[in-house]
């Protein structure tokens, strides 16, 4: 239980520090760039997932029609 409370305190401290850093010009620029990169990464993962899902669905359709 103690470790869990320390973990929660660390998360809370991280949010406070991030909030204070975001108040500065350099911090805001950093978080804006980070947000852009994370969104780009998320879009790539989502597109890849949808592409693979379509490939699997196509393979499934082909295998059921050839039987």
Image: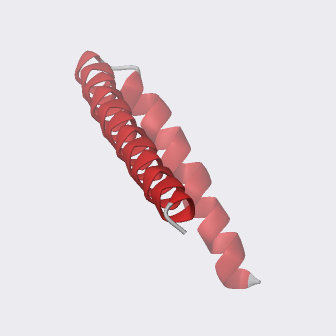
Which quarter shows the C terminus?
A: bottom right
**In the rendered image of this protein, does residue 47 appear above or below residue 62?**
above
Quadrant of the rendering where the N terminus is positioned: bottom right
Q: Is residue 56 left or right of residue 21?
A: right
Q: Is residue 6 above or below residue 37?
A: below
Q: Nearer the viewer, residue 23 or 49?
A: 49
Is 50 positioned to the left or the right of 35 in the image? right
Residue 48: percent from the left, percent from the top?
A: 35, 45
Q: How many marks?
A: 0
| Residue at position x 65%, y 82% in the image | 3
Seen from the viewer's position, the closer of residues 16 and 29 is 29
Q: Residue at x 37, y 34 (%)?
A: 43
Query: Which residue occupies 61% across, 51% down?
Result: 12
Protein image colouring: secondary structure
Is 64 situated above or below 45?
below
In the rendered image, residue 45, in percent from the top left (x then y), is placed at: 37, 45
Residue 23 placement, left or right of 33: right
* Rendered image quadrant of residue 64: bottom right
Q: Position of residue 19 (x, y in %)?
A: 49, 31
Residue at the front extreme of this rendering = 67
In the image, residue 53 sits, relative to residue 67, either above or below, namely: above
Which of these two is toward me, 49 or 24? 49
Which residue is farthest top?
Answer: 25
**Residue at (39, 25) in percent of width and height:** 22
Q: Position of residue 7 (x, y in %)?
A: 61, 69
């Amino acid at each position: 239980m103690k470790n869990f409370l320390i973990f929660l305190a660390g998360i809370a401290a991280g949010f406070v520090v991030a909030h204070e850093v975001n108040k500065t010009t350099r911090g805001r620029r950093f978080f804006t760039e980070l947000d852009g990169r994370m969104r780009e990464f998320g879009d790539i993962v989502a597109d890849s997932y949808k592409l693979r899902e379509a490939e699997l669905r196509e393979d499934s359709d082909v295998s059921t029609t050839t039987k």
